[in-house]
Image (cartoon, rainbow, N blue to C red):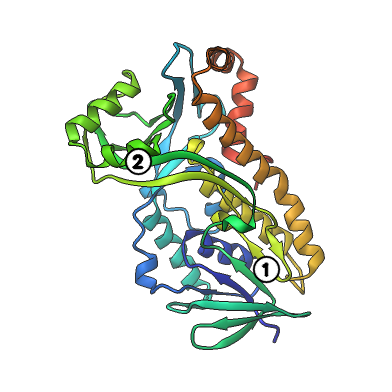
Amino acid sequence: MAPPIAIIGAGPLGLATALALSRRGQAVEIFDARSLAATQQDNRTLALSHGSRELLELLGAWPAALATPITHITISQQSGFARSQLSAAEQRLPALGYVLGASALHAALLRQVQAAGIPLHEETRLESSQPEAAYIELQLQHATSQARLLLRCEGFVPEQEATRIRDYDQHALLCRATPVAPHQNLAHERFTARGPIALLPFGQDYAVVWTVPAQEAEGLLTAPEAEWLGALNGALGGLATLNSISERAHHPLGLRMRREITAPRCVWLGNAAQTLHPVAGQGFNLALRDAWELADTLTGASDPGAPELLARYAARRKLDREGAAGFTDLLVRGFSTHNPLISGLRGAGLAALEVLPPLRHFVAKRMIYGARAWP
C-alpha cells in the first residue's frame, strides 16, 4: 500500500484539510507534537465568512448552534463622517459571516475526523523530513515514517523564507466586551489613525480586536478597566458603548508571505504559508480556502506529491493569497495615515461604497469568497 498524506498540526486547519482530502479518496494521517487535550484548549475567537460556512457544511463540521451570525457590517473612520454598511439581505445571504470559538470548531471537526477513521498521532513531533523521488521520509519524535506528501498546517513563516515582510509596529488587543444595548448581529470595522477596531457579535457580547501602536499595548493591557473602556468607547465614537470586558490578551501584527508554498513533496498552508493583519478577518478564511483548493487539485491523483500537481496548486492559490495580502495591507496602511489628502480619499471611498450597490457587492463578495467564488 502506498504511504498516506501526512498532515502536521491537529488544529482546526489540519483537521479540515484531513477531512477535505479524505472526502476525495486520499489516505491521510495527522501528527501533532501536543496532546489531543492540548489541541482542544484554544481560546481564540474566529471570524468565519459565509463561504467558510459552506465549506465546513460540506465537511459535516458546521456547529450552527454555537455560531453567532453577522447580518450587517458597518465600516467607518474616526476622522470623517462617511460610513458604509454591508448587508446580508442585500447579498441574498442568511449572514455575511459568523463568529465562533475556535474550540467549538475544533470539536466539530474532530468528531468528523474520528468518525472517518483518520489516524491522529498525538504527542508526535516531526523532527525533520527528506524528500525522495516517490515519497518523503519523516523523522518523527519516536519513529521514522514515509508519506507521499507532507502538509504543514501549523506554525508561521520564518523571516528567512518570506518574500514579503511588513512590521506594522502594532499589537492587537483582544477581549470580550458586553455592550450596553443588544448588538443585533451588527459588526463594526472602525478605522482610526492608531489602527483599526473590530467589534464582532459573539453570543450576547462583542469579540473585540483593537489595534494600537506597539508602544501603547503594554500600558493598555494593565490599565484599569474603566480607563480601557473610556479609551475604547472614545475611539468608537458612539457606534457602540461597552460597559465591561473579559481578560485581555495581545499579540504583535505583521505581514509575511512565504516565498514558495510548495517544495518537493511538501506544501505549507494557512499561517505557515502567509500571516496577515487581522483587519477584515481574512486569515483563517484564507487558510480554509488553501485546504479546499489543495483537496480539489489532488482529487483522483494516484501520486498526490507529483511536482506538476503541486505547481498547479501553487498557481491556483496565487491570486487569492496575493489579493488577500494586498487588500489587508492597503486597509491598514491607507487608514492609518494622518495625510489629509489620503484622509479625503478614504472618505470618498466610503461614500462611494455607500451609494454604489455594485461596489458594495464586489467588496462583500471579495470578503466572503476570496478572489474567486467557491466552493
Tell me the residue at 27%/38% (across/down).
219
Specify whether residue 318 is in view: yes
Specify whether residue 179 is in view: no
Q: Amino acid at mark 1?
A: Cys
For the residue labelled by badge 1, is the local secondary structure a helix, a strand or a loop? strand
* 32 shown above or below 90: below
In this rendering, which labeled residue sits more in front, label 1 or label 2? 2
The tag on residue 113 is none
Front position in the image: 296 or 287: 287
Q: Quadrant of the N terminus?
A: bottom right
x and y percent of residue 124 in the render?
47, 79
Q: Amino acid at mark 2?
A: Leu
x and y percent of residue 80 in the render?
45, 12
x and y percent of residue 17 in the render?
58, 62
Which of disc 2 and disc 1 is earlier in sequence? 2
* 148 shown above or below 18: below
As drawn, the residue found furthest toward the right would be 308
- Graded by Cα atoms within 10 Å as few (under 14), some (14 to 19) or many (20 or more), the crowding at tag 1 reads many
Q: Are marks 1 and 2 in contact (CB under 8 Å)?
A: no
* 335 shown above or below 43: above
Q: How many marks?
A: 2
Residue matched to label 1: 266
Query: Which quadrant of the structure image shows residue 3?
Result: bottom right
Tell me the residue at 78%/79% (across/down).
133
- Graded by Cα atoms within 10 Å as few (under 14), some (14 to 19) or many (20 or more), the crowding at tag 2 reads many
Residue matched to label 2: 173
As drawn, the residue found furthest toward the front would be 215
Label 1 and label 2: CA atoms lie apart by 34 Å
Front position in the image: 128 or 62: 128
